[in-house]
Image (spheres, rainbow, N blue to C red):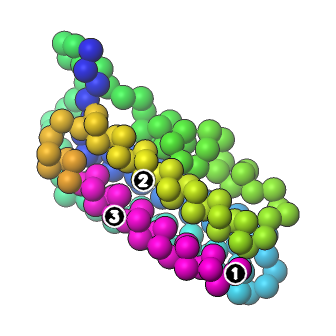
């Protein structure tokens, strides 16, 4: 049995992951009274929101079939993108901010965020195995490059905090 997926589904997952990231960072911002700490995390939340918009525009640019593709023959669709996004990167909780308990330092949160970004890259590389069209795989490569940028920025912020 073959499992297939396309760039539209992958981009829906990417949008959800970015949305979850924004929730995570807004919660982190609320944990700090100092403007430097809260401002840094609010900036990261806005950054995730911007990436969500980028992925939504990419998805809108793809030509959409008249009907949603469904299982046919020996193929089956992957689970709902919302569910996959929740499991993939920002934990299995419905609210990814629940992973923050309120006693973490800025560096602790940045470390968690770095790990989540790394996990997302692994997730997207694995997802490519389910995408039959090369053009759709190239869209996932764009997502992976964006996540790598996230890692570089978070790593730099963590270095500043240590």
Residue 6 seen in the current view: yes
Residue, x 53% and y 48% (percent of image)?
89
Q: Nearer the viewer, residue 146 or 152?
A: 152
Q: Quadrant of residue 148?
A: bottom left
42 lies left or right of 106: left
Q: CA distance from mark 1 to mark 3?
A: 25 Å
**Label 2 crowd (10 A; few <14 / some 14-19 / many >=20):** many
Q: Is residue 100 magenta?
A: no
Q: Name the spot of residue 18 as percent of width and height, x first.
A: 48, 58
Residue at image mark 2: 121
Q: Name the spot of residue 159 as percent of width and height, x first.
A: 62, 80
Q: Quadrant of residue 50?
A: bottom left
**Label 3 crowd (10 A; few <14 / some 14-19 / many >=20):** few
Quarter of the image that includes the C terminus: bottom right
Of callouts 2 and 1, which one flags the residue occurring earlier in the amino acid sequence? 2
Residue 71 seen in the current view: no
| Majority secondary structure in the magenta region | helix
Q: Circle 3 sits in a helix, a strand or a loop, which is it?
A: helix
Q: Circle 2 sits in a helix, a strand or a loop, which is it?
A: helix
Residue at image mark 3: 145
**Label 1 crowd (10 A; few <14 / some 14-19 / many >=20):** few
Residue at image mark 1: 161
2 lies left or right of 100: left
Q: Total number of numbered labels? A: 3
Residue, x 78% and y 70% (percent of image)?
105
Quarter of the image that includes the N terminus: top left
Q: Quadrant of residue 107?
A: bottom right
Q: CA distance from mark 2 to mark 1?
A: 24 Å
Of callouts 1 and 3, which one flags the residue occurring earlier in the amino acid sequence? 3
Residue, x 20% and y 47% (percent of image)?
136
Q: Is residue 99 above or below residue 146?
A: above
- For the magenta stretch, what is the residue range? 139-162
């Amino acid at each position: 049995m073959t499992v297939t997926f396309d760039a539209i589904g992958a981009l829906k997952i990417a949008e959800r992951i970015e949305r979850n990231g924004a929730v995570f960072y807004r919660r982190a911002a609320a944990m700090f009274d100092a403007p430097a700490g809260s401002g840094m995390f609010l900036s990261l939340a806005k950054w995730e929101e911007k990436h969500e918009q980028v992925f939504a525009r990419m998805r809108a640019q793809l030509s959409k079939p008249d009907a949603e593709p469904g299982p046919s023959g020996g193929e089956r669709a992957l689970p709902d993108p919302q569910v996959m996004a929740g499991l993939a990167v920002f934990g299995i909780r419905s609210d990814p901010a629940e992973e923050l308990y309120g006693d973490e330092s800025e560096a602790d949160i940045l470390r968690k965020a770095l790990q989540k970004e790394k996990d997302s890259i692994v997730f997207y590389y694995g997802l490519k195995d389910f995408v039959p069209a090369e053009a759709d795989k190239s869209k996932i490569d764009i997502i992976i490059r964006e996540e790598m940028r996230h890692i570089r920025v978070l790593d730099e912020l963590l270095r500043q905090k240590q």
